[in-house]
């Protein structure tokens, strides 16, 4: 296993052994349950279930029942793994201490907070125009967006006003600073996307990235 599902609980601060004050995020990571294992010649994957809900579809209920579980799991997500072990079987409970250890470098994926429709100053950090010379009402406007006669159109991907936030965001290079095995709480150095109780995917970074030290 190299990943877990969890909920973002809160953001606060801690002090490292050398006295440095660091920002941390508490994540309710698991317990998760293995709902499906695929062992193909080209890839190997494990599907995890997390959270509970009142109602699920008949298809999801049958899928979970096939794994030998009675839980009404709210989220189902699949991850590719380099290899499978004897313990990777449907119906197995996976706790935070089974996957992560203090010092591991992880990446966290979540959905960022939605900001609604935003202008170019807030969305892209544009400076805006000057207030003088009759432009008192144009200071937050994007300005000219054209590209003259050639090509005679606006380039695809032009930074303009539009919906901001509510995107899938991955924060990489975060480190695990503490684990509470009783409550399955993972404390990570740094901030992660999304609001409280938002779904997060926590994955170990490739081994080429050295472990962080505090």
Image (spheres, grey):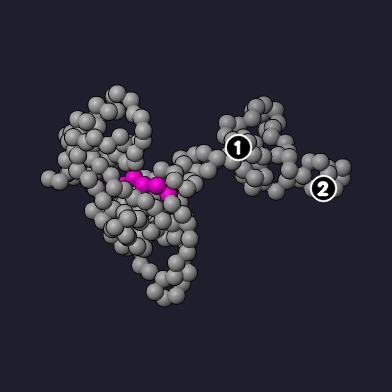
Residue 82 position, x and y percent, is: 22, 45
Residue 7 belongs to the span the image colors magenta: yes
Mark 2 or mark 1, earlier in chain: 1
Q: Are marks 2 and 1 in contact (CB under 8 Å)?
A: no
Magenta stretch in the rendered image: 2-8
User: Looking at this rendering, what residue extends furthest in the right direction?
Assistant: 134
Q: For the point 53% across and 43% down, which residue is it?
A: 113
Local SS, label 1: strand
- Residue 206, relative to residue 111: is it above or below? below
User: Looking at this rendering, what residue extends furthest in the front direction?
Assistant: 54
Magenta stretch: helix, strand or loop mostly:
strand
Q: For the point 52% across and 39% down, which residue is it?
A: 166
Quarter of the image that includes the C terminus: bottom left
Is 137 on the left or on the right of 96, as rendered? right
Disc 2 crowd rating (10 Å Cα; few below 14, some 14-19, many 20+) is few
Q: For the point 34% across and 39% down, which residue is it?
A: 52
Residue 137 belongs to the span the image colors magenta: no
| Residue wearing tag 2 | 131
Q: For the point 67% across and 26% down, which residue is it?
A: 152
User: Looking at this rendering, what residue extends furthest in the top direction?
Assistant: 58
What whole-number distance in Å separates the C-alpha atoms at marks 2 and 1? Answer: 26 Å
Closer to the observer: label 2 or label 1? 1
Is 130 on the left or on the right of 80, as rendered? right
- Residue 39, relative to residue 19: is it above or below? above
- Looking at the rendered structure, which numbered label has been put on residue 16? none
- Looking at the rendered structure, which numbered label has been put on residue 116? 1
Disc 1 crowd rating (10 Å Cα; few below 14, some 14-19, many 20+) is few
Q: Is residue 34 in sight in this rendering?
A: yes
Local SS, label 2: loop
Q: Is residue 207 in sight in this rendering?
A: no
Is 56 on the left or on the right of 116, as rendered? left
Q: Front-most of 146 and 198?
A: 198
């Amino acid at each position: 296993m190299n990943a877990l599902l969890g909920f973002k609980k809160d953001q606060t601060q801690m002090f490292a052994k050398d006295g440095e004050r660091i920002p941390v995020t508490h994540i309710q990571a698991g317990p998760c349950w293995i709902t499906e294992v695929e062992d193909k010649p080209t890839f190997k994957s494990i599907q995890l279930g997390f959270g509970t809900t009142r109602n699920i579809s008949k298809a999801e209920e049958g899928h979970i029942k096939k794994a030998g579980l009675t839980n009404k799991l709210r989220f189902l997500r699949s991850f590719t793994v380099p290899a499978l072990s004897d313990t990777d079987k449907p119906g197995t409970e996976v706790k935070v201490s089974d996957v992560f250890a203090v010092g591991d470098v992880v990446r966290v994926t979540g959905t960022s907070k939605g900001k609604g429709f935003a202008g170019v100053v807030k969305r892209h950090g544009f400076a805006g125009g000057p207030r003088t010379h009759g432009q008192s009402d144009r200071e937050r406007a994007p300005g000219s967006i054209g590209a003259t006669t050639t090509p005679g159109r606006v380039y695809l991907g032009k930074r303009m006003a539009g919906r901001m936030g509510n995107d899938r965001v991955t924060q990489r290079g975060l480190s695990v600073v503490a684990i509470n095995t009783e409550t399955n709480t993972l404390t990570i150095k740094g901030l992660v996307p999304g609001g409280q109780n938002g779904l997060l995917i926590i994955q170990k970074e490739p081994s080429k990235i050295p472990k962080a030290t505090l």
